[in-house]
Image (cartoon, grey):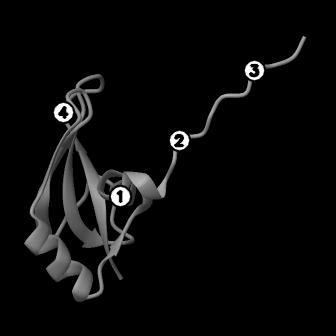
Amino acid sequence: MLKIKLLPKGQTHQRTYRVVVSECRSKSNGKYIADLGFYTPQTKTISIDQTLLTTWVKNGAQLTEGVDKLINPDKYPRKKKVAKKA
């Protein structure tokens, strides 16, 4: 089964992520089939080729939760913190 997932790159505190299509059982930083774009969390920059993304989804690739949160942020609302009572 193919998954569209985030591939970590860079140093520990300077991470960038590539959005790739790979086999679901491959390692998180292992081989991949296609490169769809990138995500930089420091600057909140997202660049994904939408035509390739829709093509792979039509062919049966599934989005992981992390990629789905980047593409559809309204689908996953932020949880509000609850103040502890003394």
- Residue 61: x and y in percent read 29, 79
As measured in the structure, the alpha-carbon distance from the residue carrying label 3 to the one carrying label 4 is 36 Å
Q: Residues within 10 Å of mark 4 (few under 14, many from 20)?
A: few
| The C terminus, quarter of image | top right
Query: Type of residue at label 4?
Result: Gly
- Residue tagged 3: 83
Mark 1 or mark 3: whose residue is earlier in sequence: 1
As measured in the structure, the alpha-carbon distance from the residue carrying label 2 to the one carrying label 3 is 16 Å
Quadrant of the rendered image containing residue 62: bottom left
Mark 2 or mark 4: whose residue is earlier in sequence: 4
Element carrying mark 1: loop
Mark 2 or mark 1: whose residue is earlier in sequence: 1
Placement of 47 over or under 26, stated as above or below: above
Query: Type of residue at label 1?
Result: Asn
- Residue tagged 4: 10
- Residue 18: x and y in percent read 18, 50
Query: Type of residue at label 3?
Result: Ala
- Residue 41: x and y in percent read 27, 34
Circle count: 4
Front position in the image: 31 or 16: 16
Quadrant of the rendered image containing residue 80: top right
Kindly check if marks 1 and 4 are in contact, taking CB atoms under 8 A apart as contact. Answer: no
- Residue tagged 2: 78
Element carrying mark 3: loop
Mark 2 or mark 3: whose residue is earlier in sequence: 2
Q: Which mark is residue 72?
A: 1
As drawn, is 67 to the left or to the right of 31?
A: right
Q: Residue at x 24, y 27 (%)?
A: 42
As measured in the structure, the alpha-carbon distance from the residue carrying label 1 to the one carrying label 4 is 25 Å
